[in-house]
Image (cartoon, helix red, strand yellow):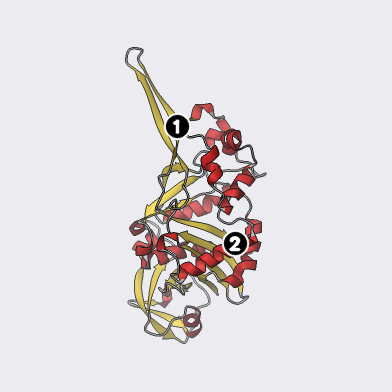
């Protein structure tokens, strides 16, 4: 069984192994054991309500319960930009015009902004290569929306995700090579790693504060602005199916797009339904139409997949094993929603 639960200190080794294989571009998952241990501790304190809600950082682990192995992680950062400045570029237009000369020139331009300050970020999504099949990726990503549905008061009304920008097979970012390297004089991988460590002061110190006119950039750099890494396309499509849309902002390092949505408009939030648990003697082994079911617990949040056949109007039929894994008893209230949006006729 694949089970979503809060990450704990014993998961450090598994998380570190995943971080080592994540590669460049997953900024919030640096391969630094000490830092990852600190983030796990921060997450544990967040789930136990031991930190200020606006400083909370929740990490969810995907566990293969049969092997007792953590194979994936995803996170929610309650607020960004409140303790350290949050930077993005906004893709906009600068207009220069002269009636006398009959000239009206529109120039695409990047403006440095802090527009996402105080918004909630979904982040730190990574799934072990051996488990990138079936429903695992969608469960790992979308479980966070059920948490947002039940505890919206702890988060901003606007949710966003920074998508990994385009890079070639060698990990080189055309946008970074054309722009960032001119000001930071370091490899993209190092700048990305330093950001993941939380060393963001150098961004403010070295980043140009003036608008960047796109015609000054190379064609290769212009073409990747707002484009995602090939490996990130499925994740982007998944978020778009939940209601996320490109908001005109891009990452300052690799120009990857930001997508955003209001909590109330997230498909998994909007279409989710509360139901009571009813015990069942049957165990459904083949899930044809996957349904996410959460136990609605703040501190001991759990999510698993069941089949549509286990839904009976206002109740959901769960086996004893599943009730134990979800820490539920007969009569408890759960939240359910189809894993995927219904296809339009």
The image quadrant where one finds the N terminus is: bottom right
Vertical arrangement, residue 98 with respect to residue 195, above or below: above
Residue 3 in sight from this viewpoint: yes
Q: Residue at x 49, y 80 (%)?
A: 322
Between 147 and 305, which is closer to the camera in this rendering?
Answer: 147
Residue 129 in sight from this viewpoint: no
SS for dot 1 = strand
Q: Residue at x 55, y 38 (%)?
A: 206
Vertical arrangement, residue 269 with respect to residue 327, above or below: above
> Badges 1 and 2: C-beta atoms under 8 Å apart?
no
Where residue 196 sits: x, y (%)? Answer: 57, 52
Between 336 and 46, which is closer to the camera in this rendering?
Answer: 46
Where residue 301 sits: x, y (%)? Answer: 46, 72
Q: Residues within 10 Å of mark 2 (few under 14, many from 20)?
A: many
The image quadrant where one finds the C terminus is: bottom left
Vertical arrangement, residue 267 with respect to residue 317, above or below: above
Image mark count: 2
Q: Residue at x 64, y 45 (%)?
A: 171
Sequence-wise, which precedes: disc 1 or disc 2? 2
Which mark is on residue 109?
A: 1
Vertical arrangement, residue 258 with respect to residue 127, above or below: above
Q: Residues within 10 Å of mark 1 (few under 14, many from 20)?
A: some
Residue under pointer 2: 36
Between 253 and 320, which is closer to the camera in this rendering?
Answer: 253
Q: Residue furthest top?
A: 100
Q: Residue at x 55, y 68 (%)?
A: 62
User: Is 196 displayed left or right of 118 in the figure?
Assistant: right
């Amino acid at each position: 069984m694949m089970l979503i639960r809060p990450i704990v200190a014993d998961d450090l080794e598994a998380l570190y192994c995943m971080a080592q294989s994540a590669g460049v571009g997953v900024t919030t998952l640096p391969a630094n054991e000490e830092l990852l241990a600190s983030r796990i501790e921060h997450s544990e304190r967040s789930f136990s309500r031991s930190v200020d809600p606006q400083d909370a950082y929740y990490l969810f682990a995907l566990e293969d319960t049969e092997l007792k192995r953590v194979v994936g992680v995803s996170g929610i950062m309650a607020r960004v930009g409140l303790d350290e400045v949050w930077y993005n570029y906004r893709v906009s237009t600068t207009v220069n015009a002269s009636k006398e000369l009959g000239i009206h020139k529109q120039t695409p331009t990047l403006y440095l902004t802090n527009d996402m300050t105080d918004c909630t970020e979904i982040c730190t999504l990574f799934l072990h290569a051996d488990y990138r099949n079936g429903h695992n990726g969608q469960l790992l990503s979308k479980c966070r929306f059920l948490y947002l549905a039940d505890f919206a008061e702890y988060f901003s009304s606007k949710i966003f995700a920074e998508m990994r920008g385009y890079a070639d097979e060698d990990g080189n970012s055309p946008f970074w090579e054309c722009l960032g390297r001119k000001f930071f004089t370091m490899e993209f991988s190092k700048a990305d790693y330093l950001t993941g460590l939380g060393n963001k002061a150098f961004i403010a110190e070295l980043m140009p504060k003036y608008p960047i006119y796109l015609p000054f950039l190379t064609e290769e750099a212009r073409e990747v602005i707002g484009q995602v890494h090939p490996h990130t396309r499925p994740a982007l499509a998944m978020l778009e199916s939940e209601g996320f849309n490109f908001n005109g902002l891009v990452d300052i390092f690799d120009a990857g797009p930001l997508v955003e949505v209001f909590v109330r408009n997230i498909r998994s939030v909007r279409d989710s339904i509360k139901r009571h648990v009813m015990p069942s003697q049957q165990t459904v082994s083949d899930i044809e139409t996957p349904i996410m079911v959460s136990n609605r617990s703040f501190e001991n949040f759990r999510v698993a997949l069941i089949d549509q056949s286990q839904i009976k109007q206002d109740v959901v039929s769960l086996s004893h094993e599943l009730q134990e894994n979800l820490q539920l008893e007969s009569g408890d209230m759960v939240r359910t929603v189809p894993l995927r949006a219904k296809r339009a006729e």
